[in-house]
């Protein structure tokens, strides 16, 4: 079964702690993305990566970090510098370079920071 | 700043009716257009993609694109209660992989 997995589904942390969200895909996609969704809002791009060992900041990268050491994996770290980390985090992937950029999403991680 | 605007909703239609969802975008260079369906508490699911002017049909769904008017729409024929969800419009430019999303329109189909 090809797809994108994210873990955990729910995550609770205390303020001031860093937390890492996992994203794995077995679709053989080159490009991977992290989005954040807040209630009543559209998706906002945090980081994206088109190839292993390379990634670019999206629209709201402050307080987040990523790595892309393997094609299948694109973990996101929410640092203590992120002012409002509570949100629904979505990972997506796509075939790079085909020109049409259809993105497919994982099930998401709901992060609550108190 | 690229923008994607959707009719604010919520939109309520009776079962069996046609639901019409609309989206406008600001970047004339946009080349790829997508509709995602998102059930409450779940992640978005790609249901339609369209790249050229005109209509594209897939089962009960029809996407319509008018690049001159910078307008894309989604029609759902014979609406079912299972179509009740938030529909997200997403637009991609030609030179990068970034998608810009609208805030979504909540559709409720009443039995």
Image: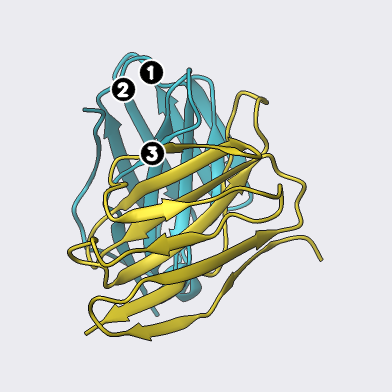
Chain colours: A yellow, B cyan
Label 2 sits on residue: B70
In front of the other: A90 or A62: A62
Residue B44 seen by the camera? no
In front of the other: A113 or B105: A113
> How many angstroms separate mark 2 from mark 3 (CA)?
27 Å
Query: At 50% across and 23% down in the image, what residue appears?
Result: B54
Viewer-nearest of discs 2 and 3:
3
CB under 8 Å between discs 2 and 1: yes
Q: Which mark is residue A57?
A: 3
Q: Which mark is residue B67?
A: 1
Task: Report helix, strand or loop for mark 3.
Answer: strand
Chain letter of the residue beneath label 1 in the structure image: B
In the rendering, at what x and y percent does residue B21 appear?
A: 34, 48
Query: At 28% across and 46% down in the image, what residue appears?
Result: A60
Viewer-nearest of discs 3 and 1:
3
In the rendered image, the quadrant that contains the C terminus of chain A is bottom left
Chain letter of the residue beneath label 3 in the structure image: A
In the rendering, at what x and y percent does residue B40 appear?
A: 39, 75
């Amino acid at each position: 079964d090809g797809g994108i997995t994210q873990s955990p589904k729910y995550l609770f942390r205390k303020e001031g702690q860093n937390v890492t969200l996992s994203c794995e895909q077995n679709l053989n996609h080159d490009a991977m993305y992290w989005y954040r969704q807040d209630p009543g809002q559209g998706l906002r791009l945090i980081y994206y990566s088109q190839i292993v060992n390379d990634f670019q900041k999206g629209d709201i990268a402050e307080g987040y970090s990523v790595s892309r050491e393997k094609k299948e994996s694109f973990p996101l770290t929410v640092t203590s510098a992120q002012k409002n980390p509570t949100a629904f985090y979505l990972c997506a992937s796509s075939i790079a370079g085909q020109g049409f950029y259809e993105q497919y999403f994982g099930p998401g991680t709901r992060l609550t920071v108190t | 700043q690229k923008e994607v605007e959707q009719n604010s909703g919520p939109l309520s239609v009776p079962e069996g009716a046609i639901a019409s969802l609309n989206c406008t975008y600001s970047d004339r260079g946009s080349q790829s257009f997508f509709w995602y369906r998102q059930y409450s508490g779940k992640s978005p699911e790609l249901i339609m993609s369209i790249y050229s002017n005109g209509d594209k049909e897939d089962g009960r769904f029809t996407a319509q694109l008018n690049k001159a008017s910078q307008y894309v729409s989604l029609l759902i024929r014979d609406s079912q209660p299972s179509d009740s969800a938030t529909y997200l419009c997403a637009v991609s430019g030609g030179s990068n992989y970034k998608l810009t999303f609208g805030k979504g329109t909540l559709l409720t189909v009443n039995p």
